[in-house]
Amino acid sequence: MRDTLIAPIKLLQTASHQLPEALIALIARLAAATPFWKSGQNKIDGWDFWNVTDSTVFLFEYEYALPLISPTTAASLASIGEHILPMLLIFGLLTRIGAAGLLMMTFIIQTLVYPEAWSVHILWFAPLTYLLARGGGTLSLDYLLRIERPQ
């Protein structure tokens, strides 16, 4: 009876060990980049991510209300970060820097803006933490340009 229960677990364990680390890193990069890129696209009109919409500044002034920074500056920095940092992850270029930047943004959002939304933010923290710890993998520009080699 015990072997009947253990056999599928061992089969799954063996199969999961066959997953290439590069594929896991690529999936983590795409999963982490997507919500930030989409959020950044909602902050601008067209492709000029240096110039945020008035409604974005309004959100930063009245809903997000970050301390110690003007709403216009915060909106611009968030827009720039939500475009540049996800692109670093997508291409796997300076992956750890991109992941660290998005982790900082997530931490700020979690602690200062939407503390009750931890169940969403933890889904961002997980792949970003993995990328910070492991890097972009062999399917990345970091690897291709010899910026970083997986161990």
Image: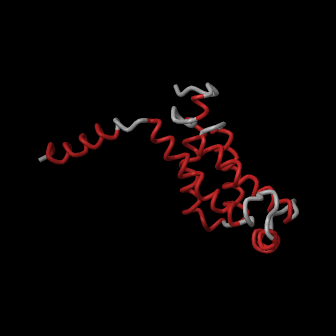
Is 127 left, or right, of 75 in this rendering?
Answer: left
* Rendered location of residue 100, percent (x, y): 67, 44
* Rendered location of residue 133, percent (x, y): 58, 37
Is 49 left, or right, of 41 in this rendering?
Answer: right
Q: Nearer the viewer, residue 33 or 110?
A: 33
**Residue that appears at 64% across and 57% down:** 36
Q: Nearer the viewer, residue 16 or 83?
A: 83
Number of numbered labels in the structure image: 0
Is 75 left, or right, of 131 in this rendering?
Answer: right
Q: Specify the quadrant of the image occupied by residue 66.
A: bottom right
Q: Specify the quadrant of the image occupied by residue 20.
A: top left
Q: Is residue 97 visible?
A: yes
Q: Nearer the viewer, residue 28 or 12?
A: 28
* Rendered location of residue 72, percent (x, y): 86, 64
* Rendered location of residue 30, percent (x, y): 54, 49
Q: Specify the quadrant of the image occupied by residue 76.
A: bottom right
Direction front: furthest residue: 46
**Residue that appears at 25% across and 44% down:** 9
Q: Is residue 103 visible?
A: no
Display colour scheme? secondary structure
**Residue that appears at 74% across and 64% down:** 44
**Residue that appears at 55% across and 46% down:** 29
Q: Is residue 24 above or below residue 74?
A: above
